[in-house]
Image (cartoon, rainbow, N blue to C red):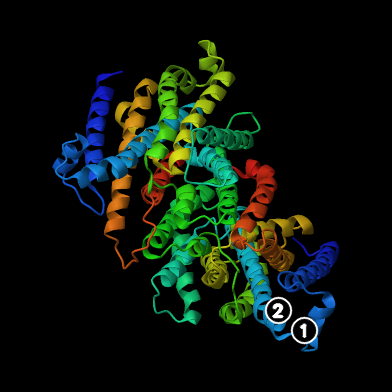
Amino acid sequence: MIAQPRHALRALALTVTLLLGLLVIGMLALQQGTPTLTPGQLGAILFAGEGERLTRIVVLELRLPRLALGIASGALLALSGVILQDTLRNPLAGPELLGITGGAAVIVGAITIFRLPAPAALVPWFTLAGGLAGGLVVLLAAQSMRSTLRLILVGASVTAFLNALLIGMISLATQNDVNLLFLFLVGSLANRTWAHLAIVLPWALLGVPAALLCARLLNVLQLGDDLAAGLGLAVAPVRLLLLVIGAALVAAVVAVCGPIGWVALLAPHLARRLLATPNAAYVLPIAALIGAALLTSADLLARLVLAPTELPVGIWTTLLGGPLLLILLRSHVGVRHE
Amino acid sequence: MNRRARVVLASGSLLLMVLVVLHLGVGSVSLTPGEVLRAVLDQADQPLHRQIVWDLRLPRAMIAIVAGALLGLAGALLQAIMRNPLAEPGLTGVSAGGVFFAVLWLTRGGTMAEPGRTLALVALAGGLAASGLVVLMARGPSGNTDPVRLVLAGVLVSSILSSATALVLLRNNQALGSILTWMIGSLNGRVWVHWEALWPWAAFALPVGLLCAGVANALQLGDPIAAGIGVPVERARLALLAIAALLAASAVAAVGAVGFVGLIGPHLTRRLVGDDARCVFPGSAVLTAVLLVGADVAAQIITLNPPFATTPYRAGLPVGAVTALLGAPFFLYLLRRSGS
């Protein structure tokens, strides 16, 4: 866990690679679609204020906010995943398997479906409450938080329950609205504008630095409760605080994009593999970048693969992330099973 | 079959009949039990009653009974061969795989309205493939399938497959009702066409499943003992798994991936009649049918009297949502017990 120069070097190289990757994905996201633009045209629109009116609107009012939202949401989800996994010392702890995402989705679903008079900026606070409630149920029901398999089973059944609630609301209270169903079951980035980004932004601006500051605490908790207590850490309150931060990181994302799964679970594992260290000081920023890259590339797929039909990005994150996670965990789960 | 099991079977069947009469009476035109019985016996007070009962509600009720029996028997079989209290068609990948293949097959033909009899066969292939994958992944280092690992693999594989299903459905612009049917399981809009596609498979699979009780009993004793009394353990387990997949796939092809009933039914039965598969299997079929019909009655009553403001164009509560709301807490309860 001691910061070694080779880890720092590796983290630096990864940061540069990921930033370049994000740049490429971002360029593609802004160019592709209808109309498709050349890099020159894109540059003219972004930096010289040129281009046709319609094209400008498509790029500046539709594609750009969506890209920015994808980056912010991916980073927030990934940070939440790192914090939850390290805090609970459980490789499968992720907001989607802890009932946090599910609880938040039920709240935002109810607000949307019943047109409850909640100001948009306050919705993340309600989803946070829902997420905390869902997470609490799962943790209490699982009894032992570190038993990987029990946690996923409890999480899966609590999520099934919450999904059934959502499906009940949608099937009874809405007209034949398929998009609504998938927005609240899997999450989507379609049709998001600057107004949506404005809801997420304050949470990202506070949440990302707060999460990065948790690195030391997470590293101490990784040592185990006894050692952490020996080092002078008040384990129980710190763990609770970290869980709340983990839930807060996803609250705004779910409020705006719905319950996008697998990014939070997968990004931390990829970051640890690539860095070859569990040191949270490195894992947190790298995971955030990986999460942003994962979500934006999944969203690119969602927009382009079956165009003009657009599929919710949550379906793609499951299709991509699910198998990848299975492979990553194949060895791991066997070792950790108690 | 012992006396206890006979009592459970008889009272279960009685309960089932009562529920079916209720089921036939529930709807936008509400019928009293007397009116239902007269309509079923072709002595209806009004021609409308006969039409409603025979054309709309009877096929739905019959599909609910048979699908429930299929799912319950499949769950009992899976629990016996995997010696795993958490095994269930929905948690072993059978349902998700079956649904995925069925949806692929249906959209390939272009129409979702006509299921046809091959559909169950297609669902069977999907169910077998998915459950095979899950079982392979659940193999521990010692070669035994570990109960909790199995469900873990099942949950992950199922969620990937159901995303794939969603992709196919959305790609083909399906309406909400059809998406709900396949993603969570629903009896809404089931009519005689669906019954025609279901009954031949059920007529074949249910007796075969019931006949497996003896082998299942041997497997429940554990592999060494089963081998000692002359059962080819591996082959028997594979054969029973295939039969369980057939049972589940037939049901799934008709009503979609209704979850948790295949878990609760067999558990209740075992609690009532003990561990002998010859009693558990028929009991599970009857009691799970009771559960599914009851859940569908609840789903219809809630659809008619929604607890909040709704629109007239709603899709209607799918029965799978009701079973999940009941089944998920039950699953948590089982998990708690199995852990201690």
Residue B320's x, y, as percent? 41, 48
- Residue under circle 2? A59
The disc, 1 or 2, on the residue closer to the chain's N-terminal end is: 1
Q: Residue at point 32% right, 31% down? A: B286
Write down the quadrant of residue A35 in the picture.
bottom right
Of residues B127 and A244, the one nearer the viewer is B127
Q: Residue at point 47% right, 51% down? A: B178
From what the image shows, is residue A108 above or below residue B128? below
Q: Residues within 10 Å of mark 1 (few under 14, many from 20)?
A: some
Q: Chain of mark 2?
A: A
From what the image shows, is residue B290 above or below residue A199? above
Left or right, B333 with reference to B49: right
Left or right, A306 with reference to B245: right
The amino acid at mark 2 is Val
Of residues B330 and A69, the one nearer the viewer is A69
Q: Are marks 1 and 2 in contact (CB under 8 Å)?
A: yes
Q: Residues within 10 Å of mark 2 (few under 14, many from 20)?
A: many
Whether residue A145 appears in this view of the structure is yes
Left or right, A90 with reference to A131: right
From what the image shows, is residue A93 above or below residue B92? below
Residue A258's x, y, as percent? 54, 66
Q: Chain of mark 1?
A: A
- Looking at the rendered structure, the number of numbered marks drawn on it comes to 2
Q: Residue at point 47% right, 76% down? A: A123
- Judge if badges 1 and 2 mark residues of a common chain: yes
Q: CA distance from mark 1 to mark 2?
A: 8 Å
- Residue under circle 1? A45
Secondary structure state at the residue bearing disc 2:
helix
The amino acid at mark 1 is Ile
Residue that sits furthest to the bottom in the current view: A49
Of residues B106 and B165, the one nearer the viewer is B106
